[in-house]
Image: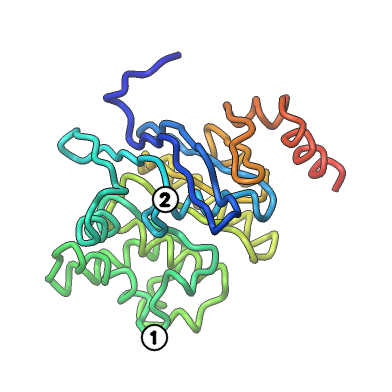
Amino acid sequence: MTRDSADTLLSVRGVGKWYGARIGCNAVSFDLYPGEVMGVVGESGSGKTTLLNCLAGQLTPDRGEVFFQMRDGSLKDTVCMSEPERRILGRTDWAFVHQHARDGLRMNVSAGGNVGERLMAVGARHYGDIRAAAVDWLGRVEIDETRVDDRPSQFSGGMQQRLQIARNLVTGPRLVFMDEPTGGLDVSVQARLLDLLRGLVRRMGLSAIIVTHDLAVVRLLADRLMVMKDGHVVETGLTDQVLDDPQHAYSQLLVSSVLQV
């Protein structure tokens, strides 16, 4: 099935990044559509995090273009955006969920303040409305409203990650970048977080790019999958197709290593 380019939310063309002579990622191209979740998998050093950071504007690629569909329907190359333009995009239509929640939270600010700050960054000023929205979002991520004035340092790792998700989604972004969102969490906590993420992504119609080494994460969340090795995409396709019938030798190795565990 083909799609009209006008439906494209993110269009990535030939993105490459090098660290001296070492390839971070090279010649990566794909389209992401509204409401679609793309998973990116590979071992450590495969280039998946470098790619994510290039797409999210946290690294400047050495080559390539990253077109994002703005609210007026136009496609704009985010690589060429000014820093203020990119900052506005990061507060409104984009969100970034870090592997370590502490990297995405203000640890000396209350849970409600963490969520409210993003609302204030897009112009919200009424304290009552901001606090009400914060309480609502704490509930959505399964944090009791009585914890609204507690600081993240008083939360468990899983709760910190859920708070980071609330902080990111409160403004209704259209594209969420996730870097190992369940990494470092206990298995039982991972399962709860994955179930929460799946529900939020579907209910909100979010588009997302999820980088992970955990194939169970992409099996549950991703519509399509890219497999990376040594900075290159070696296989791409529908998630179930790639995981159930991998074509590239490296993809086969990844899948078989999980099955043997």
Residue 257: which quarter of the image? top right
Residue lying at 45% horizontally and 59% vertically, measured from the top left: 97
Which residue is the site of mark 2? Answer: 61
User: In this view of the protein, which residue sits in the foreground, 211 or 135?
Assistant: 211
Residue lying at 60% horizontally and 31% vertically, measured from the top left: 239
> Where residue 216 sits in the image (x, y, percent)?
67, 44
Q: Nearer the viewer, mark 2 or mark 1?
A: 2
Residue 92: which quarter of the image? bottom left
Residue lying at 30% horizontally and 67% vertically, measured from the top left: 134
- Is label 2 in a helix, a strand or a loop? loop
Judged from this view, the residue extending furthest toward the top is: 1
Judged from this view, the residue extending furthest toward the right is: 260
Q: In the rendered structure, which amino acid carries the disc numbered 2?
A: Pro
> Where residue 51 sits in the image (x, y, percent)?
50, 49
Q: In the rendered structure, which amino acid carries the disc numbered 1?
A: Asn
Determine whether 72 is above or below 108 in the image: above
Q: Which numbered marker is on residue 181?
A: none
User: In this view of the protein, which residue sits in the foreground, 229 or 144?
Assistant: 229
Q: Which numbered marker is on residue 108?
A: 1
Dot 1: within a 10 Å radius of its alpha carbon, few (fewer than 14), some, or many (20 or more) residues?
few
> Where residue 34 sits in the image (x, y, percent)?
35, 34
